[in-house]
C-alpha cells in the first residue's frame, strides 16, 4: 500500500531536506520504491538546464521512480527569499490549486514511499490569503515535523504541531535534528519534547561531518511511522 507524507519544519533552515533524503534512503534500503516532490523552491541557481535548487536535486537523487526535475520542483525561483515574494517579483501569484496539480503528478506514480517537502515552516505565505499549509490540507497528507533542536525548540515544536492539528491533519512523527554542538540540557529538552508530543520520534540526527542520505538514514526508524516495510 503506497504511503505519502508532507515534511515541514519548525522554521527555515532546520534540516528538512537532510531528514527527507535520509527517510527516502531508509525506505529504499527497506526495499520500497520512492518518489519525492519539493513543489516550491526559492534560492535556485541558473544552469544550462534552467533554474536548479540543491534541495530538490538531493531529493531527486533518492527517488527510485524516474522523475524529471520539473516534476520534483515545478516552481523554482532564483532569489533566496520568501516564495510569495520571489513569485511576485516575476509577476506571478502562487495558487494552491496549481501546487496540488503539480504534486498529484508525483503522487500518481504510486511509489511505495513518497515525500512532499515544504518550504520554510508551516505558515509560509503563498498569496494574500493562502499559505503552504493549504497544500497538504488539500491532499490530506499526514505530516512529519523536523524539529531544530536548539534554544527555543520546545516552544517552536509545540506551536507547529498545534497549528498542524488545528488544520485537521495528523502528525505522523517528528525528527530531532541536533543543530547546536553545545546545546544546554540536551537530554532534558528532548525528554520534554517526547513528553509533550504525542506523535512518535522517528530519530535523532546528531551533528554529522557528512550529512549524506546514507549517514542520516542510520539514525531514522521508519517502523515508527506504522507502515508496512
Image (cartoon, rainbow, N blue to C red):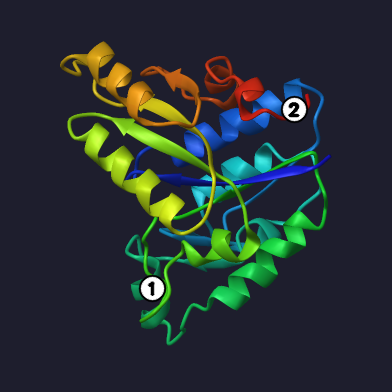
The residue at which mark 2 appears reads as 28
Q: Which of 121 and 71 is in front in this view?
A: 121
Q: Where residue 84 is drawn, which disc sits there?
A: 1
Q: Where residue 18 is drawn, which disc sits there?
A: none
Give coordinates of residue 138: x percent, y percent. Answer: 60, 66
Up-down relation of residue 79 to residue 144 (above or below): below
Q: Residue at x 78, y 27 (%)?
A: 228
Give coordinates of residue 147: x percent, y percent. Answer: 37, 34
Give coordinates of residue 17: x percent, y percent. Answer: 50, 40
Note whether residue 32 is visible. Answer: yes
In the rendered image, which quarter contains the C terminus? Answer: top right
In the rendered image, which quarter contains the N terminus? Answer: top right
Q: Which residue is drawn at 23% across and 29% down?
A: 150
Up-down relation of residue 48 to residue 96 (above or below): above
Up-down relation of residue 58 to residue 30 (above or below): below
Up-down relation of residue 11 to residue 130 (above or below): above
Q: Which of 74 and 4 is in front in this view?
A: 4
Tell me: 219 left or right of 193.
right
Circle 1 residues within 10 Å: few <14, some 14–19, many ≥20: many
As measured in the structure, the alpha-carbon distance from the residue carrying label 1 to the one carrying label 2 is: 34 Å
Tell me: 191 left or right of 2.
left
Q: Residue at x 31, y 17 (%)?
A: 191
Disc 2 element: helix
Give coordinates of residue 153: x percent, y percent. Answer: 25, 33
Identify the image quadrant of residue 158: top left
Disc 1 element: helix
Circle 2 residues within 10 Å: few <14, some 14–19, many ≥20: some
Of marks 1 and 2, which one's residue comes earlier in the chain?
2
Amino acid at each position: 500500500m503506497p504511503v505519502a507524507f508532507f515534511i515541514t519544519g519548525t522554521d527555515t533552515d532546520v534540516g528538512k531536506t537532510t531528514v527527507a533524503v535520509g527517510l527516502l534512503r531508509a525506505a529504499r534500503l527497506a526495499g520500497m520504491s520512492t518518489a519525492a516532490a519539493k513543489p516550491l523552491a526559492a534560492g535556485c541557481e541558473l544552469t544550462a538546464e534552467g533554474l536548479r535548487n540543491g534541495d530538490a536535486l538531493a531529493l531527486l537523487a533518492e527517488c527510485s521512480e524516474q522523475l524529471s526535475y520539473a516534476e520534483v520542483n515545478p516552481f523554482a525561483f532564483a532569489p533566496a527569499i520568501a516564495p510569495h515574494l520571489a513569485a511576485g517579483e516575476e509577476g506571478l501569484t502562487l495558487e494552491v490549486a496549481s501546487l496540488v496539480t503539480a504534486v498529484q503528478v508525483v503522487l500518481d506514480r504510486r511509489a511505495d514511499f513518497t515525500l512532499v517537502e515544504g518550504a520554510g515552516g508551516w505558515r509560509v505565505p503563498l498569496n494574500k490569503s493562502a499559505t503552504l499549509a493549504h497544500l497538504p490540507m488539500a491532499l490530506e497528507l499526514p505530516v512529519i515535523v523536523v524539529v531544530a533542536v536548539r534554544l527555543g525548540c520546545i516552544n517552536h515544536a509545540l506551536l507547529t504541531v498545534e497549528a498542524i492539528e488545528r488544520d485537521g491533519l495528523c502528525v505522523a512523527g517528528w525528527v530531532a535534528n541536533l543543530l547546536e554542538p553545545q546545546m544546554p540540557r540536551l537530554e532534558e529538552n528532548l525528554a520534554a519534547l517526547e513528553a509533550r508530543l504525542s506523535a512518535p520520534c522517528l530519530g535523532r540526527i546528531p551533528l554529522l561531518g557528512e550529512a549524506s542520505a546514507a549517514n542520516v538514514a542510520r539514525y531514522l526508524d521508519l517502523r515508527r511511522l506504522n507502515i508496512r516495510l
